[in-house]
Amino acid sequence: MTNRLSSANQTATSAAHVPYALFAAFNFVSGMVRLTSWDQDITWGGNTFQSIGKFAGFSDYEEGTDLISASLTFTIAGVDSSILSTALTEKYHNRDASLWVGWLDQNNNLVDTPYLLWEGFMDSMPLNSDQGQSSINLVCESRLLLLAKSAGWTYSDVHQKQFFTGDSFFSLVASLPNKVVTWGIASSTAS
C-alpha cells in the first residue's frame, strides 16, 4: 500500500510512533454522516468528521489483486441519539460509503490528505441492544459487486429499438434458432 501514499503520509508511517485516525463517510438521504475514530473532531477537505473515538470499529479488510467483492462492516457502539435516529429512519440502501486513513503529527493535525482505503455502498444496518448499550453494524458492499450484476441487456430487436428506433441490427436474431446452416460439406451445385 505504501507505494500509493503521498510522500508526507509515507514519511509519517516510518516514524517510531505513528498516530492515525480512520475516517468514514456515509451518504444518507438527509445528508452526509462523517465520523472519525480520533478522540476529537477533525476537519479536512472543508468537512468536519465527528469524533466517535474508541466506540467505532470495522471488520477486517484485505486488499487483493483479484476482482472479488468483499463486504466491510462498520460498527458503532454507544450510539449517539442523532446517529441512531438516522439509522432508524433514513433510506440508505445502495448509497455511498467510504473509508480513509490519515496520519497525524505531534499536534494531532493531519500530515497530508487521508488515504482512501475503501469505497462502496451501504447494504444493511442491523441494530443491536445488549445490556442497555446500543450498537449499529452497517454492512457495506464493495463497488466490485456491480461487476457481477447483469446489465439486463437481452440483445433482441425489441430491446435495441427501445434505444435506437430505426436500428435493425438485431432484426434477424429471432430467426437464428430455426436457421439450418450447412457447414463443411461440399455443395452439389459446385462446378
Image: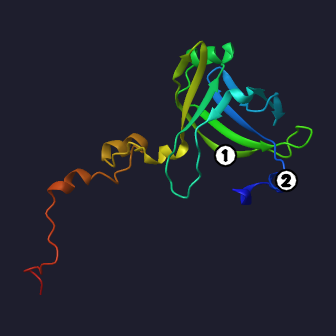
The residue at 62%/41% (across/down) is: 119
The image quadrant that residue 107 belongs to is top right
The residue at 81%/47% (across/down) is: 18
Question: Which residue is disc 2 drawn over?
Answer: 15
Give the mark count.
2
Q: Disc 2 to disc 1, how far (Cα)? A: 20 Å
- Give the image location of residue 66, x and y in percent: 51, 57
In this rendering, the answer to whether 84 lies above or below 3 is: above
Q: Please identify the quadrant where the C terminus is shown.
A: bottom left
Question: Which residue is disc 1 drawn over?
Answer: 117
Question: In the drawing, does residue 5 fall left or right of residue 163?
Answer: right
In this rendering, the answer to whether 11 lies above or below 47 is: below
Nearest to the eye among marks 2 and 1: give it.
2
Give the residue type at disc 1. Leu
Mark 1: give few (<14), some (14-19) or many (20+) Cα within 10 Å: some
Of labels 2 and 1, earlier in sequence is 2
Q: Nearer the viewer, residue 22 or 147?
A: 22
Task: Look at the numbered disc 1 and give the secondary structure of its residue.
Answer: strand
The residue at 57%/14% (across/down) is: 131
Give the residue type at disc 2. Ala
Extreme-left residue of the structure: 188
The residue at 58%/23% (across/down) is: 136
Q: Please identify the quadrant where the N terminus is shown.
A: bottom right
